[in-house]
Image (cartoon, rainbow, N blue to C red):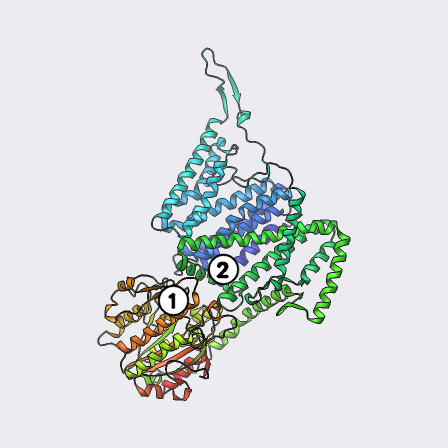
């Protein structure tokens, strides 16, 4: 009876889980699913066959690392094939693809190290490692081929052509001597292809570096083929070329000097048929005792820091590390109780889990610092692309890619470091078993005493620590809630009091009016109430009140509670326009796949021309069709020719001027309803436009000389100035282009990041309705909103999803 080999089966299972994760986050079509599943099945079968032929039943430690790399390559394969499918119109998730490939390339140096340290190098491992590398190079070439040309596929196909030629020419299958340059060339292929996929080089840079890579690869192959030709087997070859009768000798094998030495460690045949894997351990003396002790001490500090580090930025103080982690005591007790054969695998597993726990803490710290909420392990992977886009706008494409690659390598190194640290600490703990048991017993008593009396060194952080368990439990509950929320939200979408309302009964109070709904990026309650921002922003609003009253306008203001903070503007847009609480991407995707009536859809049903103006949209925006827009203007469609302002491709004044030129100035048109995103106040707030005369806006070139630079070290001052600019621009637009038939609704999409608001800020944003026709504001007199552009501290606060129904109710019927 054959032995069941679990390694290949586990690999296939993890591959399917990865594909499901990609489908749920960045999206994966049928082509991607088919390619990824076929790759996983082929990997499972090939690995099972390799184990059977080698006489093994299970994968060793090094081959498990290689299997993890192979699974990541399967994800890269699925994303690449999905992007090339003719039926797919969504953009390639470059950030996710680059991250998966970067981790796979980084782990290439790990499996060889593990093989040497554990003595598990084998011919199967070398072959497995080589095939994964070769296929990754082929897939990366396929990913970059549409942009560079099909010739780049030669980088990945050359190794397979070499193998195929070996079937016909047996002398090509002979072993090659080691050559360091061959390793350099092999490593360069994956790195240069990854750079090309990321698209960080300007102009023809990608083509140039890949051409260099191809030249290097051809040179490497040519040199190896030449060596094999010179040392091919022959019946008789001349022994020397001296005059006189020639003497011949059989040479069925190369001279002894040319024979490759036996491999040390775990080597692999790389993309050019050469040993190009991991550096060989050439010997050396063990470290001195003082170095060993220092390394052990550093390992202990790393493990302790990983266990006790808080995951909230506000609690990240030195006193927060003065804790006794219960989980650490339990792991030490378990290691002491286990038999020797099981101790090392359990220690490695504990170290890896500790590394993953640390990554979870780092993710929470980052999300709490920027978005004011913890990391969502189900949904937040989709934000990788947005993070890469933000970095690109802030530091350029090269800097963004370098940052992403460095971050991925650092995170992988962190998991490896915690694993090695726990393994290193296990030896002295077991060697001094009696002392370790006494220490654990004392610390358990200390933990119980501190828990009983609530001892704290740092506020909010108890010395008796079980935070790791609490953190994992909280995120596990979050995952369960996300899985249940899909069905709950789907049921809520179907409940809509305006679903079947006829168009002639909708928005009758706004007939003949142009209605503009403008989202002012990061315009939050702190902008009008925080003592650091309120004086400047309040002065702009007060001056705007005076000027608009002089022009015949009146306004009412209140507050809405946004579903997001610090970022995720699309969630706020969807919430306001649909009347549904959309606080995560899962809900956003569910909403877009429904037939929910949006505010734009209601205006369109009632006879308005509906328009979406998104100056920061540089990729396809399918949401426009869902929101009911007949015409959509993205960054390209607005025709801007001026400078960029950080994240914002164009200043708000140009966006409003372009809308006026393209829509409101048209003759014989229907009334327009427009959603406009004003993004000048989007972080990082380093470049701030200045208001110019509206007659000089033109194609935006005038803004080359109308720019104020704000130091990146002063984000709070930059935020205030940007919000003042956006609000001042709106006031100036109403003065210049406003009339009796214009109604403006402007609001913030969310509060800015905690770096601006500080910890614990709410999610309220100001909202204002401005009109010259008194009948419009009479319709909302029952709302209780404050007069003017600035809501007072006691102004009504509604959840943002309540606005659609209240607005339609006020102006319909």
- Label 2 sits on a secondary structure element that is helix
Foreground residue among 414 and 149: 414
Residue highlighted by disc 1: 622
Foreground residue among 379 and 416: 416
Q: Earlier in the sequence, mark 1 or mark 2?
A: 2
> Can the viewer see residue 209 in this picture?
yes
Residue 58 in the image: x percent, y percent?
64, 47
Residue 716 in the image: x percent, y percent?
43, 68
Foreground residue among 620 and 637: 637
Farthest residue in the top direction?
A: 244
**Residue at the spot 64% in from the left edge and 46% down from the top edge:** 57
> Can the viewer see residue 337 in this picture?
no
Taking 554 as reference, is 262 above or below it?
above
| Mark 1 crowdedness (10 Å alpha carbons): few <14, some 14-19, many ≥20 | few
Q: Quadrant of the C terminus?
A: bottom left
| Mark 2 crowdedness (10 Å alpha carbons): few <14, some 14-19, many ≥20 | many
Q: Which of the 4 image quadrants contains residue 672?
A: bottom left
Residue 568's disc number: none
- Label 1 sits on a secondary structure element that is loop
Taking 703 as reference, is 66 above or below it?
above
Foreground residue among 780 and 428: 428
Residue 252 in the image: x percent, y percent?
53, 25
Give the total of numbered labels: 2
**Residue at the spot 50% in from the left edge and 48% down from the top edge:** 105
Taking 6 as reference, is 566 above or below it?
below
Residue 22's disc number: 2
Q: Which of the 4 image quadrants contains residue 156?
A: top left
- Left/right placement of residue 445 relative to residue 404 reads right
Residue 249 in the image: x percent, y percent?
52, 18
Farthest residue in the left direction?
A: 667
Q: CA distance from mark 1 to mark 2?
A: 19 Å
């Amino acid at each position: 009876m054959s032995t069941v080999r679990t390694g290949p089966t586990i690999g296939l299972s993890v591959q399917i889980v990865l594909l499901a994760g990609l489908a749920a986050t960045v999206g994966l079509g049928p082509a991607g699913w088919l390619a990824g599943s076929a790759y996983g099945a082929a990997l499972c079968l090939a690995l099972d066959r390799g184990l059977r032929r080698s006489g093994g039943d299970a994968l060793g430690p090094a081959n498990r690392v290689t299997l993890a790399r192979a699974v990541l390559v399967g994800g890269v394969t699925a994303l690449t094939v999905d992007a090339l499918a003719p039926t797919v119109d969504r953009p390639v998730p470059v950030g996710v693809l680059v991250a998966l490939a970067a981790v796979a390339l980084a782990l290439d140096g790990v499996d060889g190290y593990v093989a040497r340290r554990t003595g598990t190098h084998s011919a199967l491992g070398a072959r497995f490692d080589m095939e994964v590398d070769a296929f990754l190079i082929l897939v990366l070439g396929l990913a970059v081929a549409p942009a560079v040309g099909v010739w780049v596929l030669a980088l990945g196909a050359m190794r397979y052509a070499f193998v195929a030629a070996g079937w016909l020419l047996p002398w090509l299958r002979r072993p090659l001597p080691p050559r360091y340059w061959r390793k350099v060339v092999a490593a360069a292929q994956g790195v240069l292809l990854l750079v090309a996929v990321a698209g960080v080089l300007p102009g023809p840079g990608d083509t140039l570096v890949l051409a260099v890579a191809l030249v290097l690869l051809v040179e490497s192959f040519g040199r190896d083929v030449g060596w094999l030709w010179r040392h091919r087997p022959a019946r008789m070859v001349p022994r020397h070329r001296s005059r006189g009768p020639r003497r011949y000798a059989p040479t069925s094998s190369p001279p002894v000097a040319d024979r490759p030495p036996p491999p040390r460690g775990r080597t692999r045949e790389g993309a050019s048929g050469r040993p190009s894997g991991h550096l060989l351990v050439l010997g050396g003396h063990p470290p001195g005792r003082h170095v060993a002790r220092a390394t052990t001490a550093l390992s202990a500090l790393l493990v302790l820091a990983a266990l006790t580090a808080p995951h909230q930025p506000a609690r990240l103080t030195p006193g927060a590390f003065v804790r006794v982690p219960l989980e650490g005591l339990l792991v030490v007790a378990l290691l002491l109780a286990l038999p020797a054969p099981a101790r090392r695998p359990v220690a490695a597993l504990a170290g890896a889990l500790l590394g993953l726990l640390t990554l979870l803490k780092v993710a929470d710290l980052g999300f709490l610092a920027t978005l004011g909420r913890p990391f969502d392990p189900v949904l937040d992977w989709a934000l990788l692309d947005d993070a890469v886009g933000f970095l690109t706008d802030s530091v350029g494409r090269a800097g963004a890619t370098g940052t992403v690659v460095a971050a991925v390598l650092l995170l992988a190194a962190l998991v490896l470091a915690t694993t090695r640290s726990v393994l290193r600490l296990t030896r002295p703990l077991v060697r001094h078993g009696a002392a370790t048991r006494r220490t654990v017993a004392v610390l358990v008593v200390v933990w119980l005493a501190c828990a009983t009396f609530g001892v704290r060194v740092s506020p909010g952080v108890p010395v008796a620590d079980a935070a790791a368990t609490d953190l994992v439990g909280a995120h596990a509950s979050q995952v369960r809630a996300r899985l249940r929320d899909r069905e709950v939200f789907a049921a809520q979408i179907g409940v809509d009091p305006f679903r079947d309302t006829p168009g002639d009964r909708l928005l009758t109070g706004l007939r003949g009016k142009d209605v503009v709904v403008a989202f002012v990026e990061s315009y939050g309650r702190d902008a009008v109430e925080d003592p650091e921002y309120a004086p400047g922003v309040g002065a702009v609003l007060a001056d705007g009140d005076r000027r608009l009253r002089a022009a015949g306008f009146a306004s009412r203001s209140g507050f809405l509670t946004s579903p997001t903070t610090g970022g995720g503007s699309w969630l706020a847009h969807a919430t306001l326009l649909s009347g549904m609480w959309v606080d995560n991407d899962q809900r956003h995707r569910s909403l877009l796949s429904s037939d929910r009536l949006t505010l734009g859809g209601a205006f369109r049903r009632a006879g308005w021309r509906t328009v979406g103006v998104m100056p920061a949209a540089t990729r396809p925006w399918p949401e426009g069709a869902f929101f009911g827009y007949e015409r959509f203007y993205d960054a390209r469609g607005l025709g801007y020719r001026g400078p960029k302002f950080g994240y914002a491709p164009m200043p708000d004044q140009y966006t409003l001027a372009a809308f006026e030129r393209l829509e409101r100035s048209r003759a014989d048109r229907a009334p327009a309803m427009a959603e406009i995103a004003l993004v000048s106040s989007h972080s990082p707030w380093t470049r701030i436009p200045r208001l110019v005369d509206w007659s000089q806006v033109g194609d935006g070139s005038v803004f080359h000389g109308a720019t104020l630079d704000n130091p990146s070290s002063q984000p709070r001052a930059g935020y205030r100035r940007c919000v003042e600019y956006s609000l001042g621009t709106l006031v100036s637009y109403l003065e210049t282009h406003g009339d009796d038939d214009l109604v403006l609704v402007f609001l913030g999409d969310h509060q800015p990041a905690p770096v601006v608001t500080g910890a614990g800020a709410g999610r309220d944003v100001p909202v204002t309705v401005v009109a010259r026709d008194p009948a419009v504001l009479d319709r909302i007199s029952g709302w209780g909103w404050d007069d003017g552009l600035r809501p007072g501290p006691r102004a009504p606060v509604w959840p943002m999803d309540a606005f659609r129904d209240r607005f339609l109710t006020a102006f319909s019927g």
